[in-house]
């Protein structure tokens, strides 16, 4: 990855058992994070996603101008601890950050695309390559799958993020006009066939989310 390449950070949180009812508190902590990183050089956009069927699941997406901007903020331990300590208290976390391998190449994930509305849904899919799997074969099967997905009404765009720490880890961020647009695609025979093909190469996990907050828009989802 070039140091000048845009970086997308994807942090997935699951509320701890003793904090399952504290979703509103997590959202409040995110707003503190959002305000704090807004002043940092290189920050382009940030969004908070919440699981539609699993409301104890949250994802924070942050788009950075380049790897150096991201590293500077993450490396500032005092700042990072101040804005993220509440997240760690409330939830367990897994994260991936890296460049965009396929999809919308604009650094903020939008470019000329319209800002997704509060009704939009985000299909987030993680891929972890199996031991011995061919990276190029997986990427080829995924790109073939995209040709099917892109043809559906309600598909707004996507970004496939490739981890710069673990070569076998990927996250696809797919934006849809709403759950009603995505679910028929998810349940289609074509999707099932593509999922079987990709499962040969990688362990696949996914979820459907709503964007509670997106700094690219002014309104907040209720």
Image: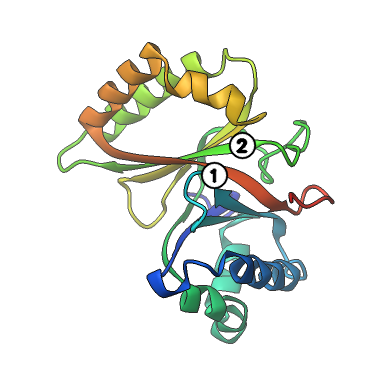
In this view, the residue in front, 65 or 113, is: 113
Question: What separation in Å lies between label 1 and label 2 (alpha carbons)?
Answer: 9 Å
Q: Is residue 196 left or right of residue 94?
A: left
Q: In terms of image quadrants, where is residue 9?
A: bottom right
- In the rendered image, which residue does mark 2 sit on? 121
In this view, the residue in front, 72 or 3, is: 72
Instruction: Identify the residue at image location x=41%, y=53%.
Output: 164
In this view, the residue in front, 59 or 39, is: 59
Indicate whether 137 appears above or below 59: above
Indicate whether 184 appears above or below 65: above
* Dot 1: element: loop
> Given this view, does label 1 or label 2 mark the residue nearer the observer?
1
Q: Position of residue 169 (x, y in %)?
A: 35, 47
Residue 177 is tagged as none
Q: Position of residue 86 (x, y in %)?
A: 55, 78
Q: N-terminal of the two: label 1 or label 2?
A: 1
Q: Position of residue 126 (x, y in %)?
A: 39, 43
Instruction: Identify the residue at image location x=74%, y=42%.
Output: 118
Work out which residue is located at the far right of the displayed protein and give it: 218
Q: Residues within 10 Å of mark 1 (few under 14, many from 20)?
A: some
- In the rendered image, which residue does mark 1 sit on? 52
Instruction: Identify the residue at image location x=58%, y=78%.
Output: 80
């Amino acid at each position: 990855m070039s140091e000048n390449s845009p970086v997308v950070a994807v942090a997935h949180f699951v509320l701890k058992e003793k904090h399952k009812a504290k979703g509103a508190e997590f959202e409040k902590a995110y707003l503190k994070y959002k305000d704090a990183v807004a002043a940092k050089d290189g920050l382009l956009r940030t969004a908070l996603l919440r699981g539609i069927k699993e409301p104890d699941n949250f994802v924070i997406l942050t788009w950075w101008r380049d790897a150096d901007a991201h590293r500077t903020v993450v490396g500032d331990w005092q700042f990072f601890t101040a804005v993220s300590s509440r997240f760690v208290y409330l939830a367990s976390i897994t994260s991936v950050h890296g460049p965009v391998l396929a999809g919308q190449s604009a650094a903020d994930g939008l470019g000329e695309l319209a800002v997704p509305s509060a009704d939009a849904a985000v299909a987030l899919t993680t891929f972890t390559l199996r031991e011995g799997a061919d990276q190029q074969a997986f990427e080829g099967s995924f790109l073939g799958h995209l040709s099917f997905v892109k043809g559906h009404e309600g598909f707004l765009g996507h970004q496939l993020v490739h981890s710069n720490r673990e070569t076998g880890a990927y996250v696809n961020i797919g934006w849809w006009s709403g759950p009603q647009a995505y679910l028929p695609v998810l349940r289609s025979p074509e999707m099932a066939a593509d999922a079987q093909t990709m499962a040969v190469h990688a362990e696949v996990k996914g979820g459907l989310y709503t964007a509670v907050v997106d700094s690219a828009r002014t309104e907040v989802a209720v």
